[in-house]
Image (cartoon, helix red, strand yellow):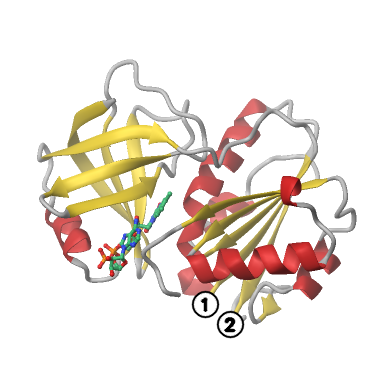
């Protein structure tokens, strides 16, 4: 389905990530983890994940890493009541109802569909599984949705930060998310579903890490944010 929606407002999340909110068409539904094709004009078309949980707000929200591209510039020029076109929702980076341990591996802006899924799980209040978020970023300032993600009420839930620069984030691991960090933080690799989201290099590295640790392909679901080199 294609929709014309109105821009409402933007919310700065970090120095390089901004959320953009749009009107929600009547009757529109999506599943946490899905994305939409966002058209801002000729040749300005990108898939963006819905970063809010489906039932929580009266608006649709996307969160974009700002790169200075024409697409980003156009987003930042939007004023209330400007219209854009959305197609979807689509994508299978979603939960299938399996009630087991979920380990989310997010690389930077790859947090967007994971935030939607985690908030949805927390809102359910009856999720009997266990959830861990392993979240890689450059530094403290770069962590989108930090306070909110750390405050989610889910059984056995915790956020493991992995940062190039750990200053200001007690307990964070230094460096990139590695096989060592995953095996240390996830005690029972066998009975776990891994949800990986981020730029292509990050997703590729995580798949190698997980397979190296003995995870099967069925245990790994990925959302690859094409269009980013790092
Ligand atoms: C399923 C999915 C969900 C995504 N969700 C988000 C999100 O929530 N937040 C976010 O910030 N980004 C998301 N992305 C990435 C986003 O769609 C853009 O590709 C990315 O942000 C780069 O766009 P840009 O405007 O910053 O730079 P641009 O200058 O427009 O693109 C950078 C380079 O990447 C190439 N490129 C751009 N898009 C694609 C593509 N789809 N496939 C192949 N090459 C491409 C361009 O040709 C260019 O060379 C998602 C991507 C996918 C596939």
Placement of the C terminus among the 4 image quadrants: bottom left
Q: Quadrant of ligand 1?
A: bottom left
Question: Which residue is located at x 74 percent, y 31 percent?
Answer: 98
Question: Which residue is located at x 47 percent, y 70 percent?
Answer: 142
As drawn, is 216 to the left or to the right of 196?
right
Placement of the N terminus among the 4 image quadrants: top left
Rendering coords of residue 27 (x, y %): 34, 16
Q: Secondary structure at mark 1?
A: loop
Could you say which disc has been placed on residue 100 in the image?
none
**Towards the viewer: 51 or 34:** 34
What whole-number distance in Å separates the C-alpha atoms at marks 1 and 2?
5 Å
Q: Secondary structure at mark 2?
A: loop
As drawn, is 8 to the left or to the right of 126?
left
Question: Which residue is located at x 41 percent, y 60 percent?
Answer: 226
Q: Earlier in the sequence, mark 1 or mark 2?
A: 1
Which image quarter: residue 166? bottom right
Question: Which residue is located at x 64 percent, y 77 percent?
Answer: 176
**Towards the viewer: 27 or 223:** 223
The residue identified by callout 1 is: 138
Rendering coords of residue 163 (x, y %): 60, 76
As drawn, is 65 to the left or to the right of 165?
left
- Contact? badges 1 and 2 (CB < 8 Å): yes
Seen in the picture, residue 103 relative to 65 is either above or below; the reply is above
**Towards the viewer: 22 or 37:** 37
Seen in the picture, residue 106 relative to 212 is either above or below; the reply is above
Q: Residues within 10 Å of mark 1 (few under 14, many from 20)?
A: some
Rendering coords of residue 182 (x, y %): 77, 66
**Towards the viewer: 126 or 218:** 218
Q: Is mark 2 within 8 Å of ligand 1?
A: no
Could you say which disc has been placed on residue 164 in the image?
2
């Amino acid at each position: 389905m294609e929709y014309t929606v109105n821009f409402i407002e933007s919310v700065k999340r970090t120095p390089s990530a901004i959320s953009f909110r749009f009107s929600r068409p009547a009757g529109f539904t999506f599943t946490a983890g899905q994305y939409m094709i966002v058209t801002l004009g000729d040749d300005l078309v990108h898939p963006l994940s819905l970063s809010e949980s489906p039932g929580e707000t009266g608006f649709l929200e996307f969160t974009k890493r700002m790169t200075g591209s024409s697409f980003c510039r156009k987003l930042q020029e939007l004023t209330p009541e400007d219209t854009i076109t959305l197609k979807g929702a689509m994508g299978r980076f979603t939960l299938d109802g399996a009630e087991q341990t979920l380990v989310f591996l997010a690389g930077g802006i790859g947090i967007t569909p994971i935030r939607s899924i985690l908030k949805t799980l927390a809102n359910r209040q009856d999720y009997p599984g266990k959830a861990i978020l392993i979240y890689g970023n450059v530094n403290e300032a770069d962590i989108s949705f930090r306070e909110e993600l750390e405050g989610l009420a889910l059984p056995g839930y915790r956020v493991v930060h992995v940062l190039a620069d750990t200053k200001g984030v007690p307990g964070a691991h230094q460096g990139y998310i590695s096989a060592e960090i995953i095996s240390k933080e996830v005690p029972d690799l066998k009975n776990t579903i891994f949800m990986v989201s981020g730029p292509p290099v990050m997703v590729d590295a995580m798949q190698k890490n997980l397979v190296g640790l003995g995870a099967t392909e069925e245990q790994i679901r990925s959302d690859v944010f094409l269009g980013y080199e790092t």
